[in-house]
Amino acid sequence: MKDAEEDELSIPEGSPTDEEFEGSEMERDDLGPLEAEAELSARQEALIAALLSEPTQEAAADRAEVPRSTMYRWLREVTFAARYRDARRDLFTHQMGRLQKTTGIALDTLREVMEDPANPAAARVTAAKAILDLARQNIETADFEERLTALEEMQR
């Protein structure tokens, strides 16, 4: 059975083809004005929400009550793919913020384990090693960011 929305959801003329879009580094800003501003249907929005919360694409299609063939087609469409990518990026950014808020508690826990003489030596050493590894990784990341910034400045 053909989906009622299939006829309404055609990609505007002049849009990149699936082959041009796939495997490219296109960002939402690279899309034409029609693709960037195009509104998604309520079913497409529901599918994006389900794709972000369900463990598989098939489960997402079932939850959003969208035929799987329609989901696969939408995932190849430039506008839908761009919106889905943006939603995934937003969710990731939010999760990273939540993660950063818990790092202080995690470090406090490691420090408490490390400093408590009642804990087995192996636990205290493991906590100390974890703290040292995190400190080293933090320094390496800062150094990398500094070098990257310098290279970017040289490119300008």
Image: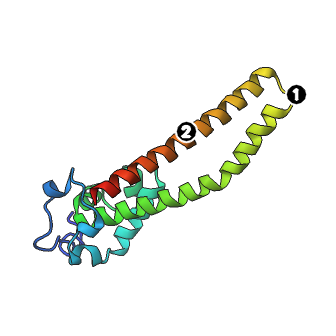
Q: Observer-nearest residue: 113 or 2?
A: 113
- Do the residues under discs 2 and 1 have CB atoms within 8 angstroms? no
Query: Could you tell me if residue 63 is visible in this image?
Result: no
Q: Identify the amino acid type marked 2.
A: Gln
Specify which label sits upstream in the sequence, 2 or 1.
1
Return the x and y of residue 4 as percentages of the image width and height: 23, 72
Mark 2 closeness class: few <14, some 14–19, many ≥20 residues within 10 Å: few
The residue that disc 2 covers is: 137
Hey, which quadrant is residue 28 in on the image?
bottom left
Image quadrant in which you'd find residue 126: top right
Residue 80 screen position, x and y as percent: 29, 65
> Which tag is nearer the camera, tag 2 or tag 1?
2
Amino acid under disc 1: Pro
Residue located 53% across and 61% down the image: 94
Left or right: 147 in relation to 103: left
Residue that sits furthest to the right in the current view: 118
Label at residue 69: none
Percent position of residue 136, x then y = 58, 36
Q: In the drawing, does residue 134 fall left or right of residue 8?
A: right
Q: Which of 43 and 105 is in front in this view?
A: 105
Rendered residue at 14%/68% (across/down) = 15
- Reply above or below: 98 against 32: above
Q: Which mark is residue 117?
A: 1
Can you say which quadrant of the picture contains the C terminus?
bottom left
Q: Residue at x 67, y 29 (%)?
A: 129
Classify mark 1: helix, strand or loop: loop
Percent across and percent down for residue 87 are 41, 63
Please tell me whether residue 56 is drawn above or below residue 130 in the rendered image. below
- Between 136 and 84, which is closer to the camera in this rendering? 136
Check disc 1: other Cα within 10 Å, few if <14, some if 14-19, many if 20+. few
